[in-house]
Amino acid sequence: MPMHVWRRLREVAGPERTPARNFHLANLLALHAGVLNSVGFVATATYTSHMTGLTAIVADHLVLGDFRLVALGLLAIASFVAGAASCALVFNWSRRRGLRSKYASVLVLESSMVLLFGLLAERVTWEHRTWLFIPVLCYTMGLQNAIVTKASDAQIRTTHVTGMVTDIGIELGKLLYRPSRSDLAPVVANVGRLKHHLSIVGLFFGGGVLGAFGYLTIGFYALIPAALWLLIIALPPLVADFRDWPAPPRP
């Protein structure tokens, strides 16, 4: 791999964060999330990144008396929360030790889970395998959403499309607004933010197309390229840490 490519990959998941690096990481993870979410839906009829929908499902089926779906929905939500909590545990363990891979280590955990899932899921013949598939996919979604939230100080989320589409609408409204009075300050749209959100939503959509097509073509094996790509992004900071091991702990 050329040195400049390796250096850029090292920066994307590296410890020094800038708005540009956060944006690049968010774009890569939005594409990955789209693939994972789409594969999960085609396989289980559940959007595993959509906690709003899952919460509504729990409420609806609680009233309807379908306690099986209530239990499945609660398990999915709990798995997403567990994924986010795992991100915080791994991140803070790495941060306290001054590791460059404090972000990358979470990506390695996610990519490893997705890779194993992609390799093994087709072999699961259990009649109620959705009870396994949905929690695993929700857990990885929680991991992913939490690491981007951490990296960007809660400015970016790669699976929260509702919020991003809302922000797109707000910025478009600012662009279209023309005040009738010239003595008032103009309404200025944040064009950079608009472009960022459009990019992330577009990549999430593109990942969804790839995921659905891939699953219908080769099943869960479609997740393997996505997992390997995520692993490649995470490797450079890990390699740097291994070269400098042992590193002195930081307070």
Image (cartoon, rainbow, N blue to C red):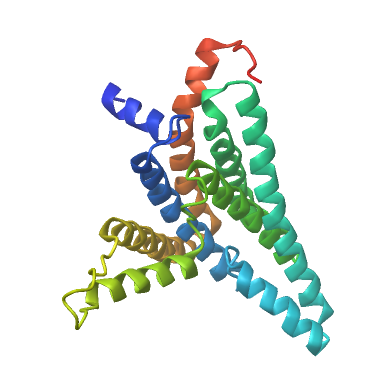
Q: Quadrant where the C terminus lies?
A: top right
In this view, 154 is above or below 89: below
- What residue sits 41% from the left and 55% below the top? 31
Among the 4 quarters of the image, the one containing residue 179? bottom left
What percent of the width, then of the height, locates residue 27?
38, 51
- What residue sits 40% from the left and 36% below the top? 12
Of residues 143 and 188, the one drawn nearer to the viewer in this rendering? 188
In this image, 205 relative to 126: left or right?
Answer: left
Q: Quadrant where the N terminus lies?
A: top left
- What residue sits 62% from the left and 44% below the top? 113
In this image, 61 relative to 232: left or right?
Answer: right
In this image, 191 relative to 96: left or right?
Answer: left
Among the 4 quarters of the image, the one containing residue 108? top right
In this view, 150 is above or below 79: above
What percent of the width, then of the height, locates residue 177?
24, 78
Q: Is residue 214 visible?
A: yes
- What residue sits 48% from the left and 67% below the top? 163
In this view, 25 is above or below 5: below
Q: Is residue 129 visible?
A: no
Residue furthest to the front in view is 183
What percent of the width, then of the height, locates residue 68?
81, 76
What percent of the width, then of the height, locates residue 38?
50, 65
State how many labels appear: 0
In this image, 82 relative to 246: left or right?
Answer: right
